[in-house]
Amino acid sequence: MQIERLDFTAPGDRLTGLYAVTQAEDLPGPTMTLRHFQMTIEGGWSRERGETWVAVREGQVLGGYTLHFPEADNTHLALLHLLKVHPGHRRRGLGGALLDHAMTRVKAEGRGVLVGSAAADRPGAAFAKAHGFFPAATEARRVLDLRTADWSGLELMRADAVRHARDYSVERWIGPAGDELLDDMARLMNGMNDAPLEDLDIEDEHWDAERFRRHDEVLAGAGLAVYTMMARHTATGEPAGFTRLAVDAQEPRGWARQFDTCVLRPHRGRRLGLILKLANLTWFHACEPSIEQVATWNSTSNPHMIGINEQMGFQVLDIWNEWQLHL
């Protein structure tokens, strides 16, 4: 067996082979197209520096891993975005060999912390624990079934919430934000630093207009159509909050993904988060009637956002951990 670096300028069958490994399990929730998969492993959501390695035997890709090395912040850590072994080749030491190779690369980069994720009830959790990782944070993945959603109840909920936020207006768009919105969106993304991190050794992320532009370009490059709704304080013109829903524009496969939602501190307590999510969902459903389910993630230490999602009808699908290892 050989462990080879994947060359994204000429990925060939190494990329398609690794993609096939990730698709070999019948896992719940939305799946990625090959295009989406390539964009996320190549540079993460804001074109981070990264590398992907594949385990190959007799021309067949049996597994692989991806590391991302943040450079704008969190330069002390590496993100293990992916570590997968084909189900037919597990329990033969391949996963351990890939992890050993990854840790050598992390140390060579001078990073002291490695962070990755795994579902609590899947083999990856036992693998992480056996190799010295500890669960530093817990997230719940929830799903809203749009086929059975109480749309009239959701509209009544939105109308009631609007009474508390009459000093705000909303703006919406599909796709990348215009140049005039980049500073506002960067400011709102910085508000995401208030989200609970539990025991993760992660610093605040620093967003500016250029980083957000790259983020939008990656989403578009992955083939995603992103529906964004932003609240603005009418009197001052300041951005107050936002939420985003994304769907694969060419191969939706019945699923959408709820991305970030944030309300900045000075504007909290006015139900803006609920208003934005309800309004965006209603708009999205009207534009994308073929979508049947929406998946979202929440830290189990974020009761406010969990409460909003449960009000909307989201149900827990599974529990995930962020696994952390100090090297």
Image: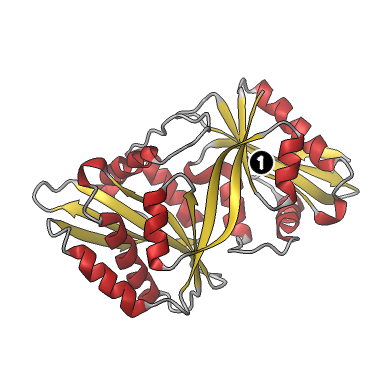
Along the horizontal axis of the image, is 232 left or right of 107?
left
- Residue 282, compared with residue 299, is above or below; it is below
Residue 235 place in picture, x, y as percent: 8, 50
Horizontal arrangement in the rendering, residue 10 relative to residue 141 (left or right): right
Residue in the picture at 61% in, 54% down: 37
For residue 31, side relative to residue 234 (left or right): right
Q: Quadrant of residue 55?
A: top right
| Circle 1: residue type | Thr
Considering the image in quadrants, where does the N terminus appear? top right
Q: Secondary structure at mark 1?
A: strand
Q: How many marks?
A: 1
x, y (%) of residue 57? 88, 46
Give me the residue at 82% from left, 49% from top: 62
Specify the farthest residue to the left: 235
Q: What residue did someone put label 1 on?
A: 66
Q: Position of residue 98 (x, y in %)?
A: 78, 37
Residue visible at 76% across and 31% down?
101
The location of residue 151, given as percent across then percent down, is: 36, 78
Q: How is the image coloured?
A: secondary structure
Could you classify mark 1 by the number of other residues whose Cα lies within 10 Å: few (under 14), some (14-19), or many (20 or more)?
many
**Quadrant location of the C terminus?**
top right
Which residue is at a point 35% across and 56% down the rendered structure image?
243
Considering only vertical position in the picture, is 59 above or below 191?
below
Q: Mark yes or no: residue 241 visible.
A: yes
Residue 166 vs residue 38, the one in the foreground: 166
Regarding residue 175, the answer to whether it shows in the image is no
